[in-house]
Image (cartoon, rainbow, N blue to C red):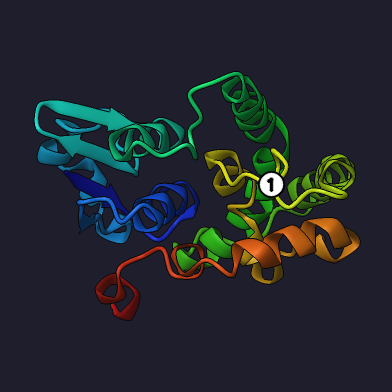
Amino acid sequence: MKLYYAETLNPRKACAVAKYLNAPVEFVHVDLTKGEQRNPSYLAINPNGKVPALQDGENRIWESNAIMCYLAQAAGSDIWPNDRRQTEVLRWLSWDGQHFTRHAGTLYFEHVIKPIFALGPPDEAATKEATGYVLHYGHILNEHLRGRAYLLGDVLTIADFAVAVTLPYAELAKIPIKEFPEVQRWHGRLNELAAWREPFSKASAAA
């Protein structure tokens, strides 16, 4: 298997899961600053021209949540549970994409991505709106995590990797995580995982 990635949010989820599972994947770095995601050879794998993407023989999987599921299934891991808990995981993946990371991701884009790609200063209106939404949905997440080790209780799932993906960048992205002690506690537990702390290959990190 080959996992194509860049050091951005969605690939972080897939790479962290791959490392957590010790999946037999070759990590292939895609340099977004050089437009490698638009090369015909890469578009043959992911026609969206986005990262991450997973190639496993004739199978080509794109979308980070699907890749996490695929890797878990291949490893026989219950971080993608094969019972009624699957519905709960799907609920949090959907909630995250529509609400929490949708808006925290805006702050990440405005404060982290724009400087990297010289896209101009942060959009004040966009950051103000996103911050308001993060505070709203962060409160919901904070209350849910009270008394729980992970989103589904005592069991780590791919939902944790998804919902927490912006938190390593909270300071740089000006995500108001300090407002939510339960979220901080939960993220501290995730940081105990080497795969979460360092999801990307050392070679690409050095570059």
Q: Is residue 61 left or right of residue 132?
A: left
Expressed as whole percent of the image width and height from the top left, the position of residue 25 reads 21, 51
Give the residue at x 18% y 33%. Answer: 45
- Whether residue 121 is visible, yes or no, is no
Expressed as whole percent of the image width and height from the top left, the position of residue 205 reads 34, 74
Residue type, numbered disc 1 = Asp
Give the residue at x 61% y 18%. Answer: 84
Q: Nearer the viewer, residue 160 or 135?
A: 160
Does residue 90 sit above or below 49 in this rendering?
Answer: above
Q: Is residue 200 left or right of residue 78?
A: left
Q: Nearer the viewer, residue 19 or 95?
A: 19
Q: Secondary structure at mark 1?
A: loop
Expressed as whole percent of the image width and height from the top left, the position of residue 173 reads 67, 63
Q: Nearer the viewer, residue 121 or 36?
A: 36
Does residue 186 sit above or below 143 in this rendering?
Answer: below
Quarter of the view holding residue 8: bottom left
Residue that numbered label 1 is attached to: 154
For the C terminus, the image quarter is: bottom left
Does residue 101 sit above or below 170 in this rendering?
Answer: above
- Whether residue 59 is visible, yes or no, is yes
Give the residue at x 73% y 58%. Answer: 186
